Amino acid sequence: MKKLTDKQRRMLEFIDRFLDERGYPPTIRDIQSGCGISSTSVVDYNLDILESRGVIERHAEVSRGIRLRARTATDAMVPVPIVGVIAAGEPIPVPGPDTWDVAAVSETMAVSPELTRGREGVYALRVKGTSMVDALINDGDIVLMQNVGTIENGEMAAVWLKAEKEVTLKKVYVEPGRVRLQPANSQMKPIYARPDNVEVQGRVIAVVRQVA
Amino acid sequence: MKKLTDKQRRMLEFIDRFLDERGYPPTIRDIQSGCGISSTSVVDYNLDILESRGVIERHAEVSRGIRLRARTATDAMVPVPIVGVIAAGEPIPVPGPDTWDVAAVSETMAVSPELTRGREGVYALRVKGTSMVDALINDGDIVLMQNVGTIENGEMAAVWLKAEKEVTLKKVYVEPGRVRLQPANSQMKPIYARPDNVEVQGRVIAVVRQVA
DNA sequence: GCCAATAGCGAACATCCGTTCTGGAATAAA
DNA sequence: TTTATTCCAGAACGGATGTTCGCTATTGGC
């Protein structure tokens, strides 16, 4: 990406500070005097460039119609309940009625709406053990799950294999007469299971790993 | 304190929603049409009352000069700049002086403070390619990095192997006469390198993977 | 140097928008 | 009823503000 000029960076800083101090965006003439720019048209000119770079949004013909993109990202956090652990040998905890009561859950994590994408019924599980390295998921990772009945072909899901009494995270493909469970690690081979042996327990939304 | 009228409550709600959607406050005439009020002077009149109640602040003679007091309480999200990509064959982008200017970066992601743990100099990289599956990191993952000079033994870091011209994410152990680079996947064998061949480019803080 | 692209300048224009003024309706107390 | 208070209607004023236009200055490549 093209670099921003010094003037454009000063303008952004000014807008950011202005929003902090006043709670509303500056006018073009505010920016002009605040950054020591000689003409309103120069401000207009550089604001257009900033918008084409995707740093800000402008509403045409609207006074103070400037929005800082970086600011919108910090908006509302979504609390997600951590309802239990996921391990190879045991089914994942079923989200109960009080699961969604923020007060009743011992632990929650805050994630940005970008991750959940506004989905309903999202909960989190802590991964225990290294049985899911073929899904590129490590011991201690946190898996964001969604409580769904059915999933689309190719989506990653927590699957309970009844006969093996084992839960695993795989991409699920329904094929004629069988279900193909494909590890996320493309170097590894899929496993196949009979349809009545698999039970989809939830869709995987995201994985978060705290390393240090 | 005196109770607010129904009209005043509608106006507050409208201002709040307007700020959410547009990023800047509404004009008096925006409020007028948005709340179905007959005259601008009525809006002005009630805004004055709201200000005297301490619910909002007004700047005289300033277009959109309305500030919601309740909004000034900042939410605890931390914006992290996404400064580039990390791939096997190229060094990671060096965070420049303007990297930390929230306003100057085109893309940011919001993470909870739990992830960064209040650390300074945290930035994010998008992973390109599957060369880091042995670190349990997939194509498209986002790696949170910290800009540090040195790291502790056993910490995961982005390492630039000069001779191989390759960047890799490994746990780093300094041993007598050599550096051991241990993949996160414990089933895989470590590799060893000469100390003058490795260059630590940053510490890995966390990994975020959006699956669906 | 020469040309094109980029950046800046200053002024003018049309509209936006906070404010104010005159007056009327609604409500409540005396 | 009268009177005071609160709330509203509509219009108009004047400054604020985004936009545009013609022109100039600077920069970068050849």
Image (cartoon, coloured by chain):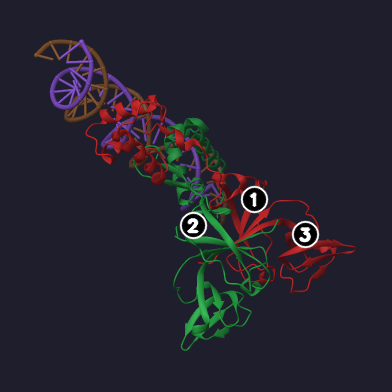
Chain colours: A green, B red, C purple, D brown
Q: What residue type is labelled 1?
A: Thr
The residue that label 3 is drawn on is B199
Q: What residue type is labelled 2?
A: Asp
| Disc 2 element | helix
Q: Quadrant of residue B206?
A: bottom right
| Disc 3 element | strand
Q: Residue furthest right?
A: B176
Left or right, A16 with respect to B23, comes to right
Discs 2 and 1 share one subunit: no
What is the spatial separation of the Cα atoms under label 3 and label 2, in whole angstroms? 50 Å
Label 1 Cα neighbours within 10 Å, binned few <14 / some 14-19 / many ≥20: many
The residue that label 2 is drawn on is A98
What is the spatial separation of the Cα atoms under label 2 and label 1, in whole angstroms? 30 Å
A89 shown above or below A119: below
Tell which subunit mark 2 falls on: A
Label 2 Cα neighbours within 10 Å, binned few <14 / some 14-19 / many ≥20: few
The residue that label 1 is drawn on is B116
Q: In front here: A94 or D12?
A: A94
Which image quarter is the C terminus of chain A in?
A: bottom right
A25 shown above or below B178: above
Q: In front here: A131 or A3?
A: A131
| Disc 1 element | helix
Left or right, B207 with respect to C27, comes to right
Tell which subunit mark 3 falls on: B
Report the disc number at residue A10.
none
- Please say if the residues under marks 2 and 1 sit with CB atoms less than 8 Å apart: no
Discs 3 and 2 share one subunit: no
Left or right, A194 with respect to B15, comes to right
What residue appears at the point 49 percent right and 57 percent down from the top-left corner?
A98
State whether residue B143 appears in this view: yes
What residue appears at the point 77 percent right and 64 percent down from the top-left corner?
B162
